[in-house]
């Protein structure tokens, strides 16, 4: 094989690599308009290999929802990008790895949960698991003490007599375990 033909092959490979990378970059650009704003917030194209596009979704429901619509999405993408996609695979795999999407997820304040117990009234600084808790056993010991101490100050569930966060009593008049048993 001559030097020239090796160069030719490298040239072709380079062009191929560029050609293969470009449609995906373009696809990322037009993805929001193809799937719509709402679906765009719940999806993230991961890769395009051969003629299969892989898209991460925020939930299994979104994966299912979009799988039903994939034929029309494939048509639109193929038309707009002059590519020949054959399939789109929607899956929740890969969704969590994106730092952007973590920010997008709604944050629920722990205090909004009925099982939340306000630490400020029961904890003292010596047992608060904040500083230098790098030894797992020490950390666990502190945690157990905190739970124990916290439990002693809690009202009891009228049904099972277990220490119960006030939020749960307010909501169900009994602890969450008893409430779950009644369902
Ligand atoms: Zn109970």
Image (tube, rainbow, N blue to C red):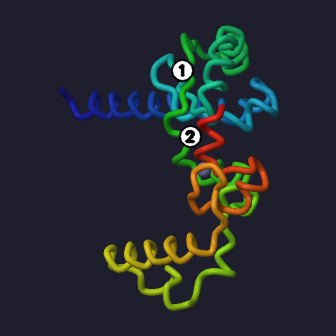
Mark 1: secondary structure: strand
Residue 77 x/y as whole percent: 68, 18
Q: Nearer the viewer, residue 164 or 4?
A: 164
Residue 125 x/y as whole percent: 56, 90
| Residue identified by numbered label 1 | 89
> Residue shown at 45%/73% (left/top)?
143
Mark 1 crowdedness (10 Å alpha carbons): few <14, some 14-19, many ≥20: some
Residue 33 x/y as whole percent: 80, 28
Q: Which mark is residue 170?
A: none
Task: Reply above or below: 1 against 84.
Answer: below
Could you tell me which quadrant the N terminus lies in?
top left
Q: Residue extending furthest bottom? A: 126
Residue 43 x/y as whole percent: 66, 33
Q: Which mark is residue 95?
A: 2
Residue 142, located in which quarter of the rendered image?
A: bottom left
- Can residue 113 be seen at all in this image of the molecule? no
Spatial separation of the CA atoms under disc 1 and disc 2: 13 Å
Mark 2 crowdedness (10 Å alpha carbons): few <14, some 14-19, many ≥20: many
């Amino acid at each position: 094989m001559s030097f020239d033909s090796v160069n030719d092959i490298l040239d072709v490979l380079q062009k191929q690599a560029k050609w293969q990378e470009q449609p995906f970059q373009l696809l990322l650009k037009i993805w929001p308009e193809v799937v719509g704003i709402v679906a765009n917030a719940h999806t993230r194209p991961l890769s395009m290999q051969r003629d299969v596009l892989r898209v991460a979704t925020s939930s299994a429901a979104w994966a299912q929802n979009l799988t039903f619509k994939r034929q029309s999405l494939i048509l639109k993408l193929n038309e707009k990008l002059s590519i020949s996609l054959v399939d789109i695979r929607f899956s929740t795999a890969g969704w969590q790895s994106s730092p952007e999407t973590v920010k997008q997820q709604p944050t629920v304040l722990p205090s909004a949960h009925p099982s939340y117990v306000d630490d400020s009234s029961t904890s003292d600084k010596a047992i608060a698991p904040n500083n230098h808790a790098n030894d797992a056993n020490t950390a666990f010991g502190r945690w157990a003490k905190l739970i124990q101490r916290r439990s002693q100050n809690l009202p009891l569930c009228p049904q099972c007599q277990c220490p119960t966060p006030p939020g749960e009593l307010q909501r169900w008049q009994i602890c969450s375990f008893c409430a779950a048993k009644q369902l």
